[in-house]
Amino acid sequence: MKNYVKRISNPLSMAAILVLSFLVVGCLPMTTSANRQFNTTLGKKHKVENVYRAELPEHLRRIAVLPFHKGNFEHGDFSEIERNFALELIKLNRFEVVVVSPDAMKELFIHDRYSSIENLPTKLLSKLHTAYGIDGVMLADISYYKPYQPVGLGVRVKLLDGRSGEIVWAVDEVFDSADPAVSNTANAFFKTESIVTYPIDATELTIHSPNRFSKFVAHSIFNTISLQKD
């Protein structure tokens, strides 16, 4: 035992231990000071303000959700974000949701997706009604996308009456987690409304992952439909 104490008391051995400790700590996941400022549910909260609401028709029961239009972010893969939006819409239990794939769109039309602000094909609604028996159509555009921390996502969404083609609900909103109000609300959502499936900090899941962040964005956007009909 005495020999052991002497060995670790050697200055060179102690230096080696310190270096090893530094390397081990350096390999551990760390939350930067920049991230810590977002690690809160306290303070100002973000509210979706840019919303258009009309009275939802009684016949609007079954809606088709079309593929997202990528706009300036054509290079991005938004399949997981689209999936999260569809799931959050289904969770509202307001509509029967039919997700139309890009391949299915190509079979019916020339293009696999359309923007919510472009002139749509004259037979878009009628063809979708014939194919899926829908009463309404939802189109969405990616207007802003920041995949690196702190992440950001902007979405423009419109819901059309399948019979008249009129817009009955629309949202155009940007969610930037660098905004404390947004990050506070996102953190609160993941701690109360959504289950964290990995044993790591909820803030890191939210701010570092655009896919996970999209769950919060979708919930916030579609909750304006829920509030409208309550």
Image: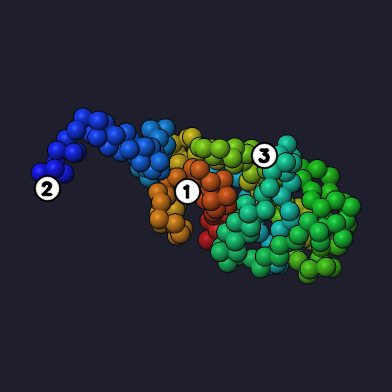
Q: Amino acid at mark 2?
A: Met
Q: Earlier in the sequence, mark 1 or mark 2?
A: 2
Marks 1 and 2 in Cβ contact (< 8 Å): no
What number of labels is visible? 3
Q: Is residue 215 visible?
A: yes
Q: Amino acid at mark 1?
A: Leu
Q: Nearer the viewer, mark 2 or mark 3?
A: 2
User: Which element type, helix, strand or loop, lies under badge 3?
Assistant: strand
Q: Earlier in the sequence, mark 1 or mark 3?
A: 3
Expressed as whole percent of the image width and height from the top left, the position of residue 195 reads: 45, 60
Q: Amino acid at mark 3?
A: Ser
- Picture residue at 45% right of the left edge, 41% below the top: 183
Q: In the drawing, what numbered circle is on residue 1?
A: 2
Q: Nearer the viewer, mark 1 or mark 2?
A: 2
For residue 78, above or below residue 148 = below
Name the one closer to the observer, 230 or 180: 180
- Picture residue at 71% right of the left edge, 50% below the top: 68
Expressed as whole percent of the image width and height from the top left, the position of residue 153 reads: 59, 41
Name the one closer to the observer, 11 or 198: 11
Given the current orientation, which residue lies at the most extreme front position? 3
**Residue assigned mark 3:** 143
Q: Nearer the viewer, mark 1 or mark 3?
A: 1
Q: Is residue 186 visible?
A: no
Expressed as whole percent of the image width and height from the top left, the position of residue 187 reads: 43, 47
Q: Earlier in the sequence, mark 2 or mark 3?
A: 2
Given the current orientation, which residue lies at the most extreme left position? 2
Q: Residues within 10 Å of mark 3 (few under 14, many from 20)?
A: some
User: Which element type, helix, strand or loop, lies under badge 2?
Assistant: loop
Expressed as whole percent of the image width and height from the top left, the position of residue 12 reads: 25, 30
**Residue assigned mark 1:** 205
Residue at mark 1 to residue at mark 2: CA–CA distance: 47 Å
